[in-house]
Amino acid sequence: MLNDKCTICNYNLKHDDCIDIPDDCIPEINANSITNSTKLTKIIEIVEDVKSKNEKVLIFSQWATFIKIISNKLNEYGVGNNWIDGTCTQEKRKTNIAKFKDNANTVVFLAT
């Protein structure tokens, strides 16, 4: 279904302004395939600093896939982490939040 306006610039859209992208042209993002980026490098740097001070850190992202990428990278570095996103049940949210608060080895909490 076509929206009346562009969500970025509010331009009035017409059907001719749009193109159809075949499903096979939309790349799948595999959270396990991302090896490094400047964001990940900086996050690891900050987390290592926080960890050395026996503190904890919350990291928020708009993208659930990026949360999983960060979690995978933290796991590689042996940094305990836990996360919640929109797919978590209320019970899983409570459990994961409690693990972050109560477990000294869980240094990072990731959320969308």
Image: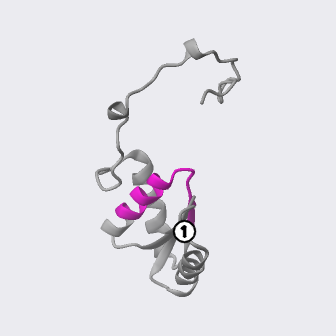
* Quadrant in which the C terminus appears: bottom right
At horizontal 47% and vertical 78% (from top left) the residue drawn is: 106
Tag 1: residue type?
Cys
Location of mark 1 (residue): 88
Q: Nearer the viewer, residue 68 or 39?
A: 68
* Quadrant in which the N terminus appears: top right
**Left or right of residue 84, residue 9 in this image:** right
Measured from the top left, where is residue 58 in percent x and y?
57, 66
What crowding class fits label 1: few (fewer than 14 Cα within 10 Å), some (14-19), or many (20 or more)? Answer: few
Depicted 38 relative to depicted 24: above or below? below
Q: Quadrant of residue 91?
A: bottom right
Label 1 SS: loop
Instruction: Give the main secondary structure, helix, strand or loop, of the magenta stretch.
Output: helix
Q: Nearer the viewer, residue 98 or 44?
A: 98
Q: Is residue 18 magenta?
A: no
Q: Nearer the viewer, residue 58 or 30?
A: 30
**Left or right of residue 25, residue 60 in this image:** right
**Left or right of residue 28, residue 13 in this image:** right
**Left or right of residue 2, residue 21 in this image:** left
What is the magenta range?
58-73
In this view, the residue farthest toward the top is 16
Measured from the top left, where is residue 105 in percent x and y?
44, 82
Q: Quadrant of residue 12?
A: top right
At horizontal 48% and vertical 61% (from top left) the residue drawn is: 46
In this view, the residue farthest toward the front is 1
